[in-house]
């Protein structure tokens, strides 16, 4: 099955080069599993996780355009259980009793209060939501004397090595400062380790001619973030339908900075559809690949909402011989536009193609010499002169 633009596909990120036209992607932007114990990655060993990233990056060497970019959003430090690592033994004289909460206590509290959410369970036990989550998911970065120690490893070098082996080169990176990993963390922990509050965007380049267009951003945008290495963007507060959403502003900035209108944007870990929505809002085509059928449906729904948001702000003005015969907003034609969108999904117009539409009663006949124009705000004007002898209806 071919993955054509403006579609979300159920598939494997490692196999995209078998389904996407070679050298067709101007920009690929995605955030892979972080290997920190999320539900959707619990079956991945560290070896499996590295292999997933390596093969996915390798596949991009075929699908990226020469001069195109691959942008990977990831936390620079990952953590995973390592039974061979010596346990960090620390005598924390300032440690408070509430941090001695065990998993058994959390399970018992939830069994006795099945309608409680995590915040309520934390209040009941006198600990933080972070403690409750770590006890239940077993992803405590600090390890402890009763569990295998957690290894901490820097990710950037791995990605750079995988990309270099695939013929892609590190071009730049951005630091995304979000906010503290936990709203109730109070900016401290029971060790000397920092509270997680930033991630990286690693930007890799495929050799070729790269168009540098400074008009993609305004002067104020270049000063505020376009030419700056640090981006301050709040994280998503409600991960209610996906465990690891990133904010819409993040892919929107990447897409505006590193691609042009009409380019095709790829996200092969599509998740809830944020990158595709950003592409739609910025006038780009998109291809989304996702391994979960649930998230495929979620992303498609998000794209439909975004498409209608764009259509609702476009004015449709077709004048005939300088007289307006019809003026509509696409939002007033939502049913017809939804049908058009669905039927055209995956179709990319080529030079010479003809797209025909009808007009409502009352527009009147056209005659030789008339000039028919369709103006779409923010996009442009399509002009067609009428040629021939008799009136054309």
Image (cartoon, grey):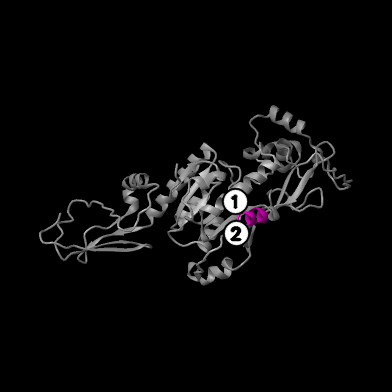
| Residue span colored magenta | 159-166
**Identity of the residue drawn at 74% across and 53% down:** 187
x%, y% of residue 152?
Answer: 76, 48
Pick the front one: 118 or 76: 76
User: Does the magenta portion include 336?
Assistant: no
Q: Report which residue position mark 1 lands on.
A: 57
Q: In which quarter of the image is residue 238?
A: top right
x%, y% of residue 68?
Answer: 53, 60
Residue 348 - label: none
**Identity of the residue drawn at 10% across and 59% down:** 390
- Total label count? 2
Q: Can residue 248 be seen in this view?
A: no
Our reading of the magenta stretch's main secondary structure is helix
Quadrant including the C terminus: bottom left
Q: Report which residue position mark 2 lands on.
A: 204
> In the image, 316: left or right of 248?
left
Q: In which quarter of the image is residue 146?
A: top right
Q: Residue furthest left?
A: 390
Kindly check if marks 1 and 2 are in contact, taking CB atoms under 8 A apart as contact: yes
Give me the C-alpha separation between circle 1 and circle 2.
10 Å
In what element is the residue under mark 1? helix
**Identity of the residue drawn at 49% across and 69% down:** 213
Q: How crowded is mark 1: few (under 14 residues within 10 Å), some or many (20 or more)?
A: many
In what element is the residue under mark 2? strand
Q: How crowded is mark 2: few (under 14 residues within 10 Å), some or many (20 or more)?
A: many
Q: Which residue lies furthest to the bottom in this view?
A: 219
Quadrant including the N terminus: top left
Pick the front one: 349 or 288: 349
> In the image, 181: left or right of 300?
right
User: Does the magenta portion include 164?
Assistant: yes
Q: Is residue 214 visible?
A: yes
């Amino acid at each position: 099955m071919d993955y054509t633009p403006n579609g979300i596909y159920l598939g494997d990120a490692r196999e995209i080069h078998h389904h996407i036209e070679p050298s067709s992607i101007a920009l690929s932007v995605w955030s892979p599993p972080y290997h920190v114990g999320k539900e959707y990655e619990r079956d991945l060993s560290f070896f499996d996780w590295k292999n997933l990233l390596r093969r996915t990056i390798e596949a991009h060497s075929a699908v990226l355009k020469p001069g195109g970019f691959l942008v990977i959003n990831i936390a620079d430090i990952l953590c995973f259980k390592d039974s061979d690592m010596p346990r960090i033994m620390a005598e924390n004289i300032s440690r408070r009793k509430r941090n001695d909460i065990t998993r058994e206590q959390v399970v018992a509290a939830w069994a006795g209060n099945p309608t409680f959410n995590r915040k309520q369970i934390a209040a009941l036990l006198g600990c933080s939501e972070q403690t409750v989550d770590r006890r239940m998911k077993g992803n405590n970065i600090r390890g402890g004397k009763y569990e295998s120690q957690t290894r901490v490893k820097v990710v950037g070098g791995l990605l750079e090595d995988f990309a270099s082996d695939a013929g892609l080169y590190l071009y730049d990176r951005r630091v995304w400062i979000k906010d503290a990993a936990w709203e109730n963390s109070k900016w401290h922990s029971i060790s000397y380790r920092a509270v997680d509050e930033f991630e990286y965007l690693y930007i890799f380049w495929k050799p070729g001619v790269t168009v540098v267009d400074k008009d993609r951003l305004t002067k104020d945008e270049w000063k505020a973030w376009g030419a700056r290495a640090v981006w301050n963007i709040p994280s998503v507060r409600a991960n209610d339908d996906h465990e690891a959403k990133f904010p819409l502003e993040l892919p929107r900035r990447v897409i505006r900075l590193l691609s042009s209108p009409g380019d095709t944007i790829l996200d092969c870990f599509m998740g809830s559809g944020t990158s595709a929505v950003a592409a739609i809002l910025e006038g780009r085509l998109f291809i989304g690949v996702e391994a979960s059928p649930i998230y495929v449906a979620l992303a498609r729904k998000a794209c439909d909402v975004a498409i209608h948001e764009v259509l609702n702000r476009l004015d449709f003005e077709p004048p005939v011989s300088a007289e307006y015969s019809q003026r509509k907003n696409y939002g007033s034609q939502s049913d017809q536009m939804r049908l058009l969108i669905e039927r055209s999904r995956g179709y990319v117009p080529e030079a010479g193609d003809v797209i025909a539409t009808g007009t409502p009663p009352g527009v009147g006949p056209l005659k030789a010499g008339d000039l028919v124009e369709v103006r779409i705000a923010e996009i442009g004007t399509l002009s067609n002169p009428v040629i021939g002898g008799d009136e054309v209806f």
